[in-house]
Image (cartoon, rainbow, N blue to C red):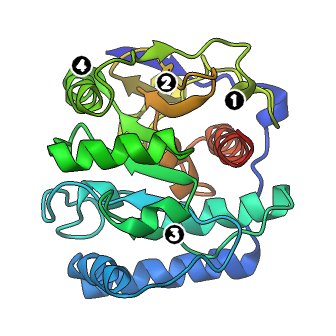
Amino acid sequence: MSLVRFQVPNRLAAPIRASGRSRRWARMTFVVLAAMGGWLLAGIVSSQNETGDAPEAEFHMVRLVHGDFGRAGYRFWGRPYWAIDYPLAEANFLPALRETTTIDVADDSRHLEITDDRIFQYPFLFMQQPGRGNWNPTALEAERMREYLLRGGFLVVDDLHGEYDWRVLESGMRRVFPDRPIVDIPEDDPLLNDFFLLDKLTQIPGQRHLRRGSGGRIVAQMQGPPSLRGIYDDHGNLMVVINFNIDMGDGWEHAGDRPYPVGMSALAYQFGVNYVIYAMTH
């Protein structure tokens, strides 16, 4: 376990803030979901899988549906691990992406299984907590993930902590790409400077990692140092980015919350913007 004290660079001192309307929408959605329970998430997936909705915007956040329901209980009872941080993460990040770039951004995310044919309509795939969710792709799912990535899709893996989580992800990725290694992303990779200049050694904590240290200072008890890892295609472009011992989604979800550090939300926004731009330009 490593103890992180927050020393945020001045350029990260203030987050990109969503509009007042977006914040009100986020709070309202949170209340509705809390009242209705985790089963609502199952209805979201079911309804999307039954329709042939085409993308109505240039960019959608697409969450990869994986694992079973009913295993996670933070905030909403019965929440599946793939849906951790939803809906507040999107409610905060997507308006920030819209305000920071010229990308036409959809208001909410899609939630699709990798075997859904519509997955190929979207260049960006967001995978939450595959470790705790015990992601174990079948042969068909691994084949479809490989096809999606080789055809130009981009996968971001987030909220992955400790050696157990890593073994789960690594095992699943070996089924997807048995011949492609997971490697550290070098500091000069375009991913880290295609919009914001990012320091990959600054660790973004999850809210559950925060503790109050001596003198009342907020510190994070992490499960190891941060690491950005990935899988490259034959042309040297990233297909997969893995946030290891990093919780970017919590940085989005808890923007403006206390005691979550303001600078960490700002950094999470910046990483997210770079990831989206990279996915849409490489």
Query: What's the distance in space between the residues labelled 4 and 3, CA to CA?
Result: 30 Å
Mark 4 lies on residue: 163
For the C terminus, the quadrant is: top right
Q: Do residues under tags 1 and 2 come within 8 Å of each other at their CB atoms?
A: yes
Secondary structure under the numbered disc 2 in the rendered image: strand
Callout in the foreground (3, 2): 2
For residue 262, which quarter of the picture?
Answer: top right
Mark 2 closeness class: few <14, some 14–19, many ≥20 residues within 10 Å: many
Query: Dot 2 corresponds to which residue?
Result: 230
Q: Which comes sooner in the sequence, label 4 or label 2?
A: 4
Which amino acid type corresponds to the residue marked 4 in the rendered image?
Answer: Glu
Frontmost residue, 259 versus 72: 72
Of marks 4 and 3, the one in the foreground: 3
Q: At which x and y percent is residue 146? A: 37, 40
Q: Which residue occupies the foreground of this view, 112 or 33?
A: 112
Tell me which residue sits at (73%, 58%) in the image.
Answer: 97
In the picture, the quarter occupied by the N terminus is top left
- State the SS at label 4: helix
Residue appearing at x 83%, y 63% in the figure: 99
Q: Position of residue 12 (x, y in %)?
A: 77, 35
Disc sitting over residue 109 in the figure: 3
Q: Nearer the viewer, mark 1 or mark 4?
A: 1
Q: Residue at 82% of width from left, 37% of height from top?
A: 195
Tell me, yes or no, if residue 137 can be seen here. Answer: no
- Which of the pair 236/171 is nearer the observer? 236
Instruction: Give the percent coordinates (x, y) of residue 115.
Output: 29, 60
